[in-house]
């Protein structure tokens, strides 16, 4: 509370890997945490957590399974109760990498995380791996998602806040080693400028095409 000079522990000690933290822009006491869990073993601590009192207490508000955690969270600009969560079945074993399951996907809440629906409308519906969501303040109903999937991996775009989706670019170069690298961003002033990061760094100036 003093711009980083001192720190206080506020919980979530057992949730494992934390992928993303998002703060409600109109109420800084409301915070969302995407917990990927322990990368080596199943854990019921995976999921999305929320505090409404600045971290004094936490509630798990989205749980899929002990093998599927949260890889990303985004709040819709201008609508902080609209939350998108990327749920990912990912586990690192000594002999292999496990990434993807039918229970993975992008989930949406319109009531601040109290209830959730799994999005479809053109998104991959079989083995759904790690994903990342990005939204520009300049076009809050346009949602981008980079999705590891078999079949159907690539960059997706929705123009209706996640109801329907179109695969705009299926270039496999956008999904190099997604277990480790899976970054997506959109220019806040120009929704046609999109950035993807994996082993390389990409920019699109035509909405992902």
Image (tube, helix red, strand yellow):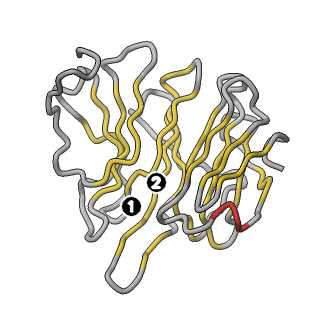
Quarter-of-image position of residue 137: top right
Q: Exactly how many numbered labels are in the figure? A: 2
Quarter of the image with the N terminus in it:
top left
Marks 1 and 2, how far apart at CA: 6 Å
Vertical arrangement, residue 112 with respect to residue 126, above or below = above
What residue sits 72% from the left and 41% below the top?
Answer: 194
Quarter-of-image position of residue 204: top right
Please give the label number shown on residue 183: none
User: Along the polypeptide, which appears first: circle 1 or circle 2?
Assistant: 1
Q: Are marks 1 and 2 in contact (CB under 8 Å)?
A: yes
Image x and y of residue 36, in percent: 35, 55
Vertical arrangement, residue 194 with respect to residue 56, above or below = below
What residue sits 76% from the left and 37% below the top?
Answer: 193
Q: In this image, 143 relative to 68: left or right?
A: right
Which element carries disc 2, helix, strand or loop?
strand
Image x and y of residue 81, in percent: 48, 24
- Mark 1: few, some, or many residues within 10 Å (few <14, many ≥20)? many
Residue holding disc 2: 87
What residue sits 44% from the left and 52% below the top?
Answer: 71
Vertical arrangement, residue 30 with respect to residue 47, above or below = above
- Mark 2: few, some, or many residues within 10 Å (few <14, many ≥20)? many
Q: In this image, 5 relative to 149: left or right?
A: left
Which element carries disc 1, helix, strand or loop?
strand
Q: In this image, 101 relative to 8: left or right?
A: right
> 125 and 33: which one is in front?
33
Image x and y of residue 12, in percent: 20, 42
Farthest front residue in view: 5
What residue sits 85% from the left and 41% below the top?
Answer: 206
Residue holding disc 1: 68
Vertical arrangement, residue 29 with respect to residue 83, above or below = above
């Amino acid at each position: 509370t003093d711009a980083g000079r001192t720190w206080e522990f506020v919980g979530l000690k057992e949730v494992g890997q934390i992928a993303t933290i998002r703060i409600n822009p109109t109420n800084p006491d409301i915070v969302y945490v995407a917990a990927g869990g322990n990368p080596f073993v199943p854990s019921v601590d995976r999921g999305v957590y929320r505090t409404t009192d600045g971290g004094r207490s936490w509630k798990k508000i989205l749980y899929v399974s002990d093998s599927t955690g949260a890889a990303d969270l985004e709040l819709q600009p201008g609508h902080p109760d609209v939350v998108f969560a990327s749920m990912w079945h990912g586990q690192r074993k000594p002999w292999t990498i496990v990434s993807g399951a039918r229970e993975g996907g992008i989930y949406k809440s319109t009531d601040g995380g109290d209830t959730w629906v799994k999005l479809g409308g053109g998104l991959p519906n079989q083995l759904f791996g790690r994903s990342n969501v990005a939204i520009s303040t300049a076009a809050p109903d346009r949602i981008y998602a980079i999705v590891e999937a078999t079949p159907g991996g690539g960059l997706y775009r929705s123009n209706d806040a996640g109801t329907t989706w179109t695969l705009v670019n299926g270039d496999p170069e956008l999904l190099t080693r997604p277990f480790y690298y899976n970054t997506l961003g959109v220019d806040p002033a120009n929704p046609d400028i999109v950035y993807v990061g994996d082993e390389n760094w990409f920019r699109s100036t035509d909405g992902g095409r």
